[in-house]
C-alpha cells in the first residue's frame, strides 16, 4: 500500500524504536524527565527562543499559544483556511473564550490592508484584538510557504498595535528546506511558534510550543489544565529527538517527489493542477467534474494507493520519507488508470 493521505502516517523505524527503548525517563510533571528536558532545550535552541514545552499534539500547542496570549472575549485574527480556524473543533472559543476573526488569504497571505482594517479600535461594542496567527507551511493552501518579508510586514502591525504573534509551524521544517531560510530567522518575529514532530519528521507523537520563558511557564499550567501533563514521556520524546537529529535532511527528497508527482499526474487530461504551486510536500489537484470523488478514492485504495478526497473533486496527496521515489510513478499510474476507467464507464 502506498499511503499518501498525510505525512502523519509514518511508523517508527528500527533506529527510532531503539532510541525509544534506551531513553532515560522520569516524571515530566515534576520536570524530572531528562529526555523531555533535552528535547525542549534542543528545540528552543534550534528556533532561537528561550524555552519550549513538549505537548501531545499540534492542536494542543496552538491552543496553549492562544490561551497564554489572550483574555476571554478577545479577538484573534487568523486566515480563513488556517488549521486553527478550520480543524481545531472551535477550541479557541471553548478553551480560551475568544472569538476568531477569519480573513480570506491568497495561499496563506492575508492582505496587509485587511489585517490593518480588522484590528479593533477601542469601543465598548467591540472585542479587543489580541493576537495574529499565521500558518507556515500552509496545509489547506497546498503546503504554501509564507515569505519572510511578508511575516515582517505583519510583525510591524503586531508591534504598532501591541498585539501578540503566533506561528502555527507544524511544518515549519518544510518551509526552511524549501527556502534555505533558517528556523531561527523564521521564528524570530513571533512570540510563540508551534512545531510538530509527528508530521513530515516521522515521530509517532508530539509537538512543541516555543517562546519566552514566561509564556512557556504559563503554558505549562495550561497544558496541565488541558490534561496534557505526561509522566515518563521520555519514551516518546526520544523518538522526537531522533527525528529532529536525523530526519530533517530527508525532507528535501519529499519535496522533489511531490514535484515529480505533480508533473506526471498533470499529464492526465482529467486532472487540473498548477505545478508552480507545488513547493513543499503537499499536492492538491482537481479531478474531472464527471467523476465521483469518494468513488475515485475507493478505487485508488483497491489498487493499493491511499489518498484523500476532500470534497468538490479536490484531492490531496502528501509525501513523507516512507514513500520511495520509485513509488511516485506507481501512484501516478494508479491515478491515471482509475480516472481513465471511470471516464470510460461514463461514455
Ligand atoms: C498546519 C497544522 N497545524 C496543526 C495541526 C494539528 O496537529 P495535530 O494533528 O498533532 O493536532 C496540523 C495537523 O495536520 C496541521 O496541518
Image (tube, helix red, strand yellow):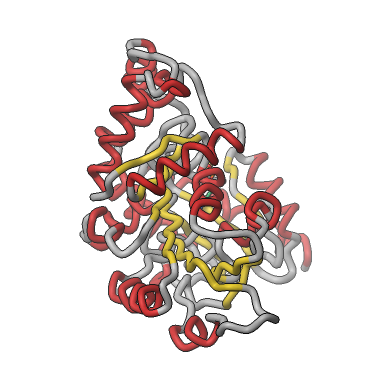
In this rendering, the count of numbered labels is: 0
Counting from the top left corner in percent of width and height, residue 74 is at 60, 66
Res 292 → quadrant: bottom right
Q: Nearer the viewer, residue 297 or 229?
A: 229
Res 213 → quadrant: top left
- In the figure, is residue 186 to the left or right of 138? left
Counting from the top left corner in percent of width and height, residue 19 is at 33, 18
Please identify the quadrant where the N terminus is shown: top right
User: Looking at the image, can residue 143 be seen?
Assistant: yes
Counting from the top left corner in percent of width and height, residue 196 is at 43, 43
Counting from the top left corner in percent of width and height, residue 192 is at 39, 54
Task: From this view, report whether residue 308 is shown above or below residue 116.
Answer: above
Task: From this view, report whether residue 51 is shown above or below residue 145.
Answer: above
Q: Nearer the viewer, residue 88 or 323?
A: 88
Please identify the quadrant where the C terminus is shown: bottom right
Q: Residue at x 57, y 53 (%)?
A: 335
Q: Nearer the viewer, residue 270 or 276?
A: 276
Res 309 → quadrant: bottom right
Q: Residue at x 46, y 43 (%)?
A: 218
Q: Residue at x 41, y 40 (%)?
A: 217
User: Looking at the image, can residue 332 be seen?
Assistant: no
Q: Nearer the viewer, residue 108 or 332?
A: 108
- In the figure, is residue 92 to the left or right of 193? right
Which residue appears farthest toward the front when viewing the image?
Answer: 124
Q: Residue at x 58, y 67 (%)?
A: 81
Task: From this view, report whether residue 22 is shown above or below residue 2.
Answer: above
Amino acid at each position: 500500500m502506498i499511503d499518501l493521505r498525510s505525512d502523519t502516517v509514518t511508523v517508527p523505524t528500527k533506529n527510532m524504536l531503539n532510541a525509544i527503548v534506551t531513553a532515560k525517563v522520569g516524571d515530566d510533571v515534576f520536570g524530572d524527565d531528562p529526555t523531555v528536558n533535552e528535547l525542549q532545550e534542543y528545540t528552543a535552541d534550534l528556533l532561537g527562543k528561550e524555552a519550549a514545552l513538549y505537548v501531545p499534539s499540534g492542536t494542543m500547542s496552538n491552543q496553549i499559544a492562544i490561551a497564554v496570549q489572550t483574555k476571554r472575549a478577545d479577538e484573534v485574527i487568523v486566515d480563513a483556511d488556517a488549521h486553527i480556524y478550520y480543524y481545531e473543533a472551535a477550541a479557541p472559543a471553548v478553551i480560551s473564550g475568544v472569538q476568531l476573526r477569519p480573513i480570506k488569504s491568497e495561499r496563506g497571505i492575508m492582505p496587509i490592508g485587511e489585517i490593518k482594517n480588522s484590528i479593533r479600535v477601542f469601543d465598548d461594542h467591540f472585542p479587543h484584538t489580541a493576537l495574529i496567527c499565521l500558518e507556515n507551511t500552509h496545509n489547506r493552501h497546498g503546503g504554501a510557504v509564507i515569505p519572510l518579508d511578508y511575516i515582517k510586514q505583519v510583525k510591524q502591525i503586531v508591534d504598532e498595535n501591541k498585539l501578540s504573534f503566533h506561528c502555527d509551524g507544524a511544518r515549519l521544517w518544510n518551509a526552511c528546506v524549501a527556502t534555505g531560510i533558517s528556523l531561527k530567522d523564521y521564528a524570530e518575529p513571533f512570540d510563540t511558534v508551534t512545531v510538530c514532530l509527528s508530521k513530515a519528521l516521522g515521530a509517532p507523537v508530539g509537538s512543541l510550543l516555543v517562546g519566552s520563558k514566561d509564556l512557556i511557564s504559563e503554558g505549562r499550567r495550561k497544558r496541565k489544565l488541558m490534561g496534557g501533563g505526561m509522566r515518563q514521556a521520555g519514551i516518546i520524546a526520544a523518538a522526537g529527538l531522533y527525528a529532529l537529529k536525523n530526519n530533517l535532511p530527508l525532507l528535501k527528497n519529499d519535496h522533489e517527489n511531490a514535484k515529480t508527482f505533480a508533473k506526471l499526474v498533470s499529464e492526465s487530461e482529467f486532472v487540473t493542477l498548477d505545478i508552480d504551486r507545488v513547493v513543499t510536500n503537499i499536492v492538491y489537484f482537481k479531478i474531472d467534474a464527471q467523476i465521483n470523488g469518494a468513488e475515485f478514492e475507493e478505487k485508488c485504495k483497491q489498487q493499493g494507493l491511499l489518498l484523500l478526497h476532500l470534497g468538490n473533486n479536490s484531492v490531496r496527496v502528501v509525501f513523507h520519507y516512507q514513500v520511495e521515489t520509485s513509488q511516485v510513478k506507481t501512484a501516478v499510474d494508479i491515478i491515471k488508470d482509475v480516472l481513465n476507467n471511470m471516464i470510460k464507464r461514463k461514455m
